[in-house]
Amino acid sequence: MKNLIIIFILLLTSFSCKKSGTQNTAQSNTGSDSLKFTKHKIEFVELGSVNCIPCKKMQPVMASIEKKYSGQVKVTFHDVWKDDAPAKKYGIDLIPTQVFLDASGKELMRHEGFFPEEEIDKFLQTQGVNISQ
């Protein structure tokens, strides 16, 4: 059964990689098992794969965001083709998916597809995060 689920996720996510990005806001909590963050204001969780073309395009964006907002934004990458547990935890439909969590682990927003750095900047700044000097 587990192998069937993994195959289904792989088929679904490989097809979904081609879909253009759409932005969805969410106000749900990630649950009682969410991690508590004290140092960072925002955690940027990227759910993708190193073998997915739109996901590969997110790699330099994630690196830039982590550097630009050093100490304020924690960037976490999960390759859901190697480990599907994060995909299940966040209930993703396609990759790449970006999930933004506040310091308490509450989901602030999610986005599906490639997410341009300029748009991430706009969102982060609305959350009170400033570019590090």
Image (cartoon, rainbow, N blue to C red):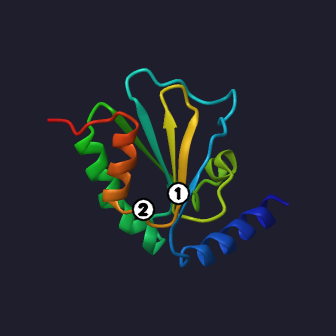
Whether 38 is drawn above or below 117: the answer is above
Residue 111's disc is: 1
Q: Residue at x 67, y 39 (%)?
A: 28
Residue pushed farthest left?
Answer: 133
Q: CA distance from mark 1 to mark 2?
A: 7 Å
Whether 69 is drawn above or below 15: the answer is above
Residue 74 location (% of width, % of height):
38, 37
Tags 1 and 2 in contact by the CB under 8 Å rule? yes
- Numbered disc total: 2
Residue 55 location (% of width, % of height):
45, 66
Q: For the N terminus, give its image quadrant.
A: bottom right
Q: Which residue is mark 2?
A: 115
**Left of 29 or right of it: where is 75?**
left
Residue 63's disc is: none
**Left of 120 or right of it: where is 7?**
right
* Residue 56: quarter of image: bottom left
Q: Nearer the viewer, residue 86 or 129?
A: 129
Q: Which kind of residue does numbered mark 2 sit on?
A: Phe
Residue pushed farthest top?
Answer: 38
Crowd around label 2: few <14 · some 14–19 · many ≥20 (10 Å): many
Q: Residue at x 40, y 29 (%)?
A: 41
**Left of 63 or right of it: where is 49?**
right
Q: Residue at x 32, y 35 (%)?
A: 129
